[in-house]
Image (tube, grey):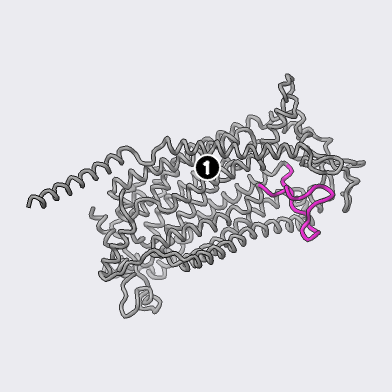
Amino acid sequence: MLRVAVCFRIRIVNFILRKKEVDGEKFDDLVKDHVFETMFPLHERAEFLRNNWAQWRDIFYKQPIDTIRNYFGEKVALYFAWLGWYTVMLVPAAITGVLLFLSSFSLFHASQISKEICEANETIMCPLQDHQHKYWRLSETCTFAKLTHLFDNEGTVFFAIFMALWATVFLEFWKRERARTAASWKLYGWDEDQEELAMELLNNPAYELQKHQHSYLRSSAILIFSLVLICLLIGMAHVLVLYRVMVTFFFSHSALPFLEQRLTTAVVITGALVHYIIIVVMTKVNKKVALKLCDFEKPRTFSERERKFTIKFFIFQLFTHFSSLVYTAFFLGRINGHPGNQVKIGGQWRLEECHPSGCMMDLFVQMAIIMGLKQTVSNCVEYLSPWLTYRIRKLREWPQGRRLHDPNLEEWLKNYSLNEVNIFSLFDEFMDMMVQYGFTTIFVAAFPLAPLLAFFSNLIEIRLDAIKMVRLQRRLVPRKANDIGTWLQVLEAIGVLAVITNGMIIAFTSEFIPRLMYKYYYGPCSRGSNVTADCMTGYVNHSLSVFRTKDYKDRIPSQRTEHVTECRYRDYRNKVDYSYSSEFWFLLASRLAFVILFEHVALCGKIIAAWFVPDIPQSVKNRVLEEKFENLCKKLRLSSRVTDV
């Protein structure tokens, strides 16, 4: 209780110093006038956290949440409690994803489709890019066809539904854990607005209540500016498309034969790297714009300002991180036309095609690179940047061998040499986790190893954040809270988006629906036919359309194969006029029907899971009920005494 009282005193002192106005100036004004440089609470009596929490050796040990709460306040403690719970719940998701991925290796050489592709030495494919001007054989994609089957198979549907249910179960169990934790801290019914009003009255007894206000004009202006930025973020995805088209052109004229042979792979990898750089740059822009819009909205309290800022910043980050992935998943290679009549940028550069083995390979590679860089590079920068800054400041402020006679002053200066913190310090940690959660769920159908990467990243993230807060940064001002606030609604929104996106990936990006339709409608096993051959025999030939080389309107590809009169390409078009065939429209209807069915099944599963797992444990409900009953009894006894008198 003593530590909780210390946190409460720090919070009150910080609030008064920030709000107190003398001669028309507040503390922040004095900082701008260089009267003061900064203010911060000191790290005191943190030995237990340093030795038993902020250590890399404690990476697999349980976190001392109550001790964290007593030192940093409830808001920081709830962040680490949520992060720890999220990491534990990633274990079944990671195991399922790995088992699905490994089980696919049993079909690495046994897949009928892969066999047909590897044996298709006589199948001549149309040129993928204008720069090559040459035909190629389908068998050249043998290895990539086998690799694609590792994550584009029948188990993908099961895993996508599993992850939709997992996201719901994770949130429901977290709500139970949150309720249990808040009840143990006597904060279950705590009211944040009442706390802020009490602080205001404590600072100024003559404080006038600021009422809620709403301006349609301000809301309209904020909506317009937000839409403009969202359009800009979507435009950045188009810039990435232009980059890939231009790089394709330049790589094709490179003097390095390796680049020309592995052109598509090189473009996908470099495109993912450029996408990561765009994410880093636009994150800084998004934060500044969201903050300006939030200030323009004039929120009533700090907590309201934080909620509004969270929503705006997350929406901007959502478009920043996922616009390019949406293009790759649902538009890449689908708006290019057909051989002899390709869509070109400026009438000169042909739009990029999917990888020869399918668009799922493009999405898998882009997800792997972006998520891998996001976890590794970001974690390294997140740790090394404050560590190097702290070392430099320590050497500057504390030359080697220098000692002070006053131990208190020496301790103050040591705290001063630590890295500065601000109101975004904990916010940034939450936002990074939300983005990671989005990668783990929204496109998990294309990258089943995402939960595994997230699990290992979180193990490091927990200790990294602990070391930063205890050893490398000044002490955060404790803040009271009984939940993670708006972030819970963000998690629920991501869960719904994950259901929609994964359903569309399976329907429109993967080959699941075409394979299913061929197996039961077009193939040798269709309509109950009893055959000894594999049901997918002939699928590759069925999925390729025919183009007559004499119909090329532009330059005719260079002849590396003599007497080529026809070439094949991935699409469902008629041989005569190249219009969409009846199979195309049947598949489109089947894809749309699958999306509707998948989303309804997954959402119904989420609703049932949310109903089956109560948000609040019965023990917490009973404890709250007992407290209400005791308080009511006390009031009735007091009322009866007054009546008797």
The span picked out in magenta is 330-356
Q: In the current view of this chain or complex, which residue is farthest to the right?
A: 563
Where residue 173 appears, x then y in whole percent? 41, 40
Q: Residue furthest left?
A: 645
* Picture residue at 76% right of the left edge, 36% below the top: 583
Can residue 336 be found in the magenta stretch? yes
Q: Is 108 placed above or below 353 here? A: above
Quick check: 42 left or right of 605? left
Q: Amino acid at mark 1?
A: Pro
Residue 205, image x, y percentages: 25, 69
Residue at 72%, 45% (x, y): give it.
355
Say which residue label 1 marks: 451
Q: Which of 70 and 568 lies nearest the eye of the viewer?
A: 568
Q: Residue at x 56, y 64 (%)?
A: 224
Nearest the viewer among 167 and 135 is 167
Mark 1 neighbour density, 10 Å: few (under 14) some (14–19) many (20 or more)? many
Residue 60 falls inside the magenta stretch: no
Direction from residue 312 to residue 148 in the image, left or right: right
Q: Position of residue 142 (x, y in %)?
A: 74, 37
In this picture, residue 67 sits left or right of residue 338: left
Q: Nearer the viewer, residue 106 or 507?
A: 507
- Residue 392 can be seen in this image: yes
Magenta stretch secondary structure, dominant: loop
Tell me residue 448's x, y (percent).
57, 40
- Local secondary structure at mark 1: helix
Q: Can residue 147 be seen?
A: no
Does 184 appear above or below 255?
A: above
